[in-house]
Image: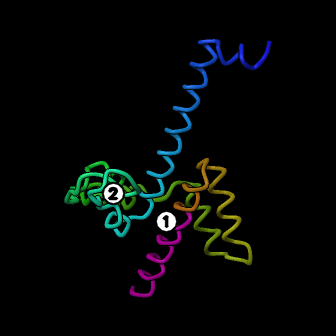
Amino acid sequence: HGVSTLLGNPSYQRTLSTRARTNRLSASRTSIDRDSDEGEEGRDTMTRSGIAKGKNGGHVTQLRERAAKPSQRKGALGKRVSLCRSIAREVAGLSPYERRILDMIKTGGSAADKRIYKYAKKRLGSHKRALAKREDIKEVNAQQRAKQAGA
């Protein structure tokens, strides 16, 4: 089979056209990603030039300010939830593993932060949660010390 017979094959031509289309799509995606990473300053450079071809080609248009989507505030702590959590913490207190972390903070030592992290990660299962819990319990410790100093 020579190259000429392969190029004459319709299924092979479809494969070639699909690959070319995929390459064009991936190239356009990367340029879009690069443009979106530039932030607010990058949006000014994307104004249309009025010329059909080129980087900023297309009809001259006014860029509109987009309204913030509700999904962008996902995970933000509301007043009600923070109040409920503080009341629950006040009533129920610390769980046993949190008390142990608090004890590790109080005793301190040279590698206390690392030990606390490793213990919290073992209990909670993820790096991010372990760091958040360590900071949370440090905050509890600071509040307790402030309360003792004030009382």
Please tell me whether residue 71 belongs to the stretch shown in magenta. no
> Looking at the rendering, which quadrant does residue 13 occupy?
top right
Find residue 146 and report its horizontal and vertical position in percent.
43, 82
Q: Residue at x 73, y 73 (%)?
A: 111
Q: Which mark is residue 76?
A: 2
Q: Which residue is mark 1?
A: 136
Specify the amino acid type for callout 2: Ala
Does 35 sit above or below residue 24? below
Does 130 sit above or below residue 7? below
Please tell me whether residue 139 belongs to the stretch shown in magenta. yes
Is residue 73 among the parts visible in the rendering? no
Find residue 37 and report its horizontal and vertical position in percent.
45, 60
Find residue 90 and report its horizontal and vertical position in percent.
37, 61
Q: CA distance from mark 1 to mark 2?
A: 16 Å
> Looking at the rendering, which quadrant does residue 51 occupy?
bottom left
Mark 1 or mark 2, which is nearer to you?
2
Number of callouts: 2
Closer-to-camera residue (1/151): 1
Counting residues from the start of the chain, the first of labels 1 and 2 encountered is 2
Find residue 103 and report its horizontal and vertical position in percent.
62, 68
**Image quarter hosting the C terminus:** bottom left
Closer-to-camera residue (113/25): 25
**Image quarter hosting the N terminus:** top right
Whether residue 98 sits left or right of residue 147 in the image: it is right
Q: Residue at x 38, y 65 (%)?
A: 42
Closer-to-camera residue (68/80): 68
Is residue 3 among the parts visible in the rendering? yes
Q: Which residues are magenta?
A: 134-151
